[in-house]
Image (cartoon, rainbow, N blue to C red):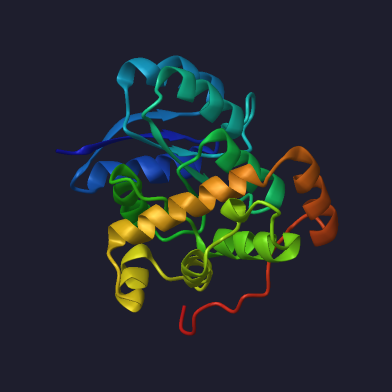
Amino acid sequence: MSIKVAIVEDNASMRDGLAALIRMSPGFTLTAACRSGDAAVRELPPLAPEVVLMDINMHGISGIETLRQLRLQLPDLKVIMLTVATDARHVYSAFETGADGYLVKDTEPVRILEAIREVHGGGSPISSPIARLLVQKFHQRGPSPHPEDNLTPREEEILTCLARGYRAKEIADELGISIHTVQTHIRKIYSKMQVRSGAEAVAKFLTQSGGTGLSNVDPRPGL
């Protein structure tokens, strides 16, 4: 069965390009291509898409607020933020609101399709710059007084692999574990990030990182 996909993007050329990609790709059905968050909140609930590609900075309500409102009507909806915004504030807000994945807009089309399949299957796809942001975040904040909020050695290993550009299958092959196990670890990383992303902590981190939070983790050679 085809995965039902919707697009929420206020840039017409980007929206049309994504719509064409979904229409032309076997295994996917385009349910809607909304030009604003306001339109998405009105139009998507009765269409019940399974996965939404969502911009963040849009005219009218933001992608974050659109996600929040859609979650009230479609609790099982999977949402991938697809945006140019890679600053800490947007990333943390997206995950705290319940985003299932986060890709930058220069992601290759084949990777976007792969991410849709991944999130539909319970995965949590992210672009390597976002993974590098999370690596930096946990390192800069240091250990939490609550051990359950800290990354385990395996979670650190997986997050570092993501930061270097590895995909879930590549991480599974590299570490000798299943893709399901990798996806479970990634979801736990997101959960721990949400726990440790209170307003005060985020403000402190933004001050320390100069507002970007991007780390110096080296990308994987050849990517």
**Snapshot quadrant of residue 30:** top left
Answer left or right for 136 relative to 20.
Answer: right
> Residue at horizontal 60%, vertical 43%?
194
Can you give x and y, in whole percent of width and height, for residue 17 in the image?
40, 46
Give the residue displayed 35% in from the left and 75% down from the top. Answer: 175
Residue 135 place in picture, x, y as percent: 61, 65
Q: Identify the residue at image location x=78%, y=54%.
A: 205
The total number of labels drawn is 0
Q: Nearer the viewer, residue 154 or 75?
A: 154
Nearer to me, 173 or 213 = 173
Query: Please, which residue is most extreme toward the right here?
Result: 207
> In the drawing, does residue 147 fall left or right of residue 41?
right
x and y percentages locating residue 112 in the rendered image: 38, 53
> Looking at the figure, which quarter contains the N terminus?
top left
**Residue 40 in the image: above or below residue 178:** above
> Is residue 43 depicted above or below 63 in this figure?
above
Answer with left or right where residue 197 lies relative to residue 154: right
Q: Nearer the viewer, residue 61 or 185?
A: 185
The residue positioned farthest toward the bottom in the image shown: 221
**Does residue 203 appear anywhere in the picture?**
yes
The location of residue 6, given as percent across then percent down, is 37, 33
| Residue at 48% across, 44% down | 14
Q: Is residue 104 visible?
A: no
**Left or right of 41: which side holds 2?**
left
Q: Identify whether 220 is placed above or below 67.
A: below
